[in-house]
Amino acid sequence: MPNLNLGLHLFHDLNPKWKVGLGLDYSRGKIDGMATVDTLAGPAALTFKQEYGIYADLFVLAQYRPMGAADRWVPFLLGGVGLAYEKDQTRLTLRNSFLDESLQVDNSGWFPIATLGVGVDIYLSERRTWYAEAGLSYSWARLRHSVPATGSLATSPSVTADTDSTGPNVWVGLGRRF
């Protein structure tokens, strides 16, 4: 599912080929849907909504610039490890004239995250103060644990919540050197 988040990266140059730093990302959002399904009590509206109030991650990052940092275009390889936190709520309802059923799952927790990617910094002037950045990475992150489930559709008091944030990422940004 496509997602937009805000991020901040702070780096320190170790030498012309390496820089290290921290990355922080934040987002929130939801997915939802509805379908009509056949039940023993006739057609019913089945609605689904997952809303996450917060997703945040903190990375320790390393950037390797194989061609150095002297040119206007500076390609790099990026790697990082860190921790992520997510808090979400999932609701499922099944309703018609005879049915009014529901399920609610509240999920939150910390989980490890890792990323590898490639990108390019493009300096916007000869002074090399401001630069545009673009990149593509792949992240591995999964929160899988047992959480409480409530409502008439809950078949047990707890369920396995499995939030898999693994997948590709595309980013664009604006940077400033200090």
Image (tube, rainbow, N blue to C red):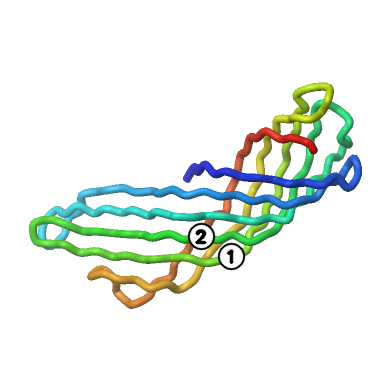
Side (left or right) of 85 relative to 74: left
Q: Furthest-right residue in view? A: 15
Q: Residue at x 26, y 69 (%)?
A: 151
Location of residue 48 by image quarter: bottom left
Location of residue 154 by image quarter: bottom left
| Closer-to-camera residue (123/120) | 123
Side (left or right) of 46 relative to 74: left
Location of residue 101 by image quarter: bottom left
How far across and how far down the image is residue 50, in percent? Answer: 38, 55
How far across and how far down the image is residue 131, in percent? Answer: 74, 30
Q: Furthest-left residue in view? A: 97
Side (left or right) of 95 relative to 127: left
Q: Is residue 166 shown above or below 136? A: below
Q: Which residue is mark 1?
A: 111
Rendered-image quadrant of the C terminus: top right
User: How many other residues sit within 10 Å of disc 2, few (<14), some (14-19) or many (≥20)?
Assistant: many
How far across and how far down the image is residue 77, in percent? Answer: 77, 43
Q: Which residue is mark 2?
A: 86
The kind of residue tagged 2 is: Glu
Q: Are marks 1 and 2 in contact (CB under 8 Å)?
A: yes
Side (left or right) of 41 relative to 117: left
The kind of residue tagged 1 is: Phe
Q: CA distance from mark 1 to mark 2?
A: 9 Å
Secondary structure of the residue carrying tag 1 is strand
